[in-house]
Image (cartoon, rainbow, N blue to C red):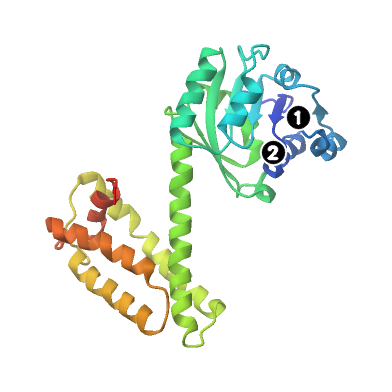
Amino acid sequence: MNNSLDTSVTVIGLGLMGQALAGAFLKAGHPTTVWNRTTSKADQLVAEGARLAPTVGDALKASSLTIICVTDYQAMHELLGATDIELDGTTLINLTSGASAQAREAAQWAEQRGAHYLDGAIMAIPPAIGTAEAVILHSGPQSDFEAHKSTLGALGTVTYLGADHGLASLYDVAGLAMMWSVLNAWLQGTALLRTAGVDAATYAPFAQQIAAGVAEWLPGYAEQIDRGSFPAEVSALETDARAMAHLIEESEAVGVNAELPKFIKTVADRSIAAGHGGEQYPVLIEEFGKPRND
């Protein structure tokens, strides 16, 4: 592991997130080289001590560790794919958002060019970078991660997920699924209560309590999924389905959009029709785990 604060770093891509990444490295004392198509985006960083490289090639040569934070994987390939770009011996950490298949393909491409490659995902907003609240996910060879873990720690809480380069992308979208599902459920409840004059701020603490309570179920439900056995220890799915019908009826009765609860009940009804009505809610993994073509 490299523990030296003198470790130099290159950051390619200076959108809001890229600027935050470079700024965190500078603040931690790392000599930092930056590059961006629009050079004016580097002005503040240069004023803080960063070096602006004239070309992508120069930026890569400046450091053995390069962080890439651009629009998408295509943009990364366009920037680094030229024949005059030398990647041999460089460690590339790609924090660009994309699909798991793209991450795996990028890893193969980088390795063919002689580079060490880690794929990553940033679970934070730019202002949080450099604090413990910023969670940065990494996947790829563990030896490459360990070699730069100390340097990467300048960005926040760094986490290694495994050797499969696609894991960071998958965790990223899994986190988004959680985020949007929780928010949509809260918005459904908020819409219901507003019909009775209850404002969102009044409902929010109760919603937080419910969300925290449901989160406590996850480890036990995860065990059921991993075992492939779903005994109804708390409630059977057919009982849950009756409560779902009540939510739909109440939403329609007070004039609130019922699409979300109808979708949830549709998934439950399919599982019940397949003979799982007497099992517990996590049995729905079998529905979520297969594609629908309709």
In three-dimensional space, the C-alpha distance between marks 2 and 1, rounded to whole angstroms, equals 9 Å
Please tell me the numbered disc located at residue 34: 1
Query: Residue 284: x, y in percent?
Result: 25, 55
Dot 2 lies on which element?
A: helix
Q: Residue at x 74, y 25 (%)?
A: 6
User: What residue does disc 2 label?
Assistant: 18
Q: Quadrant of the N terminus?
A: top right
The mark nearer the N terminus, 2 or 1, is 2
Q: Is residue 73 left or right of residue 196?
A: right
Give the camera-side residue of 217 and 18.
18
Tags 2 and 1 touching, CB below 8 Å: yes
Dot 1 lies on which element?
A: strand
Circle 1 Cα neighbour tier, 10 Å, few/some/many (<14 / 14–19 / ≥20): many
Q: Is residue 141 visible?
A: no
Q: Name the residue type under label 2.
A: Gly
Please tell me the numbered disc located at residue 216: none
Q: Residue at x 39, y 66 (%)?
A: 213
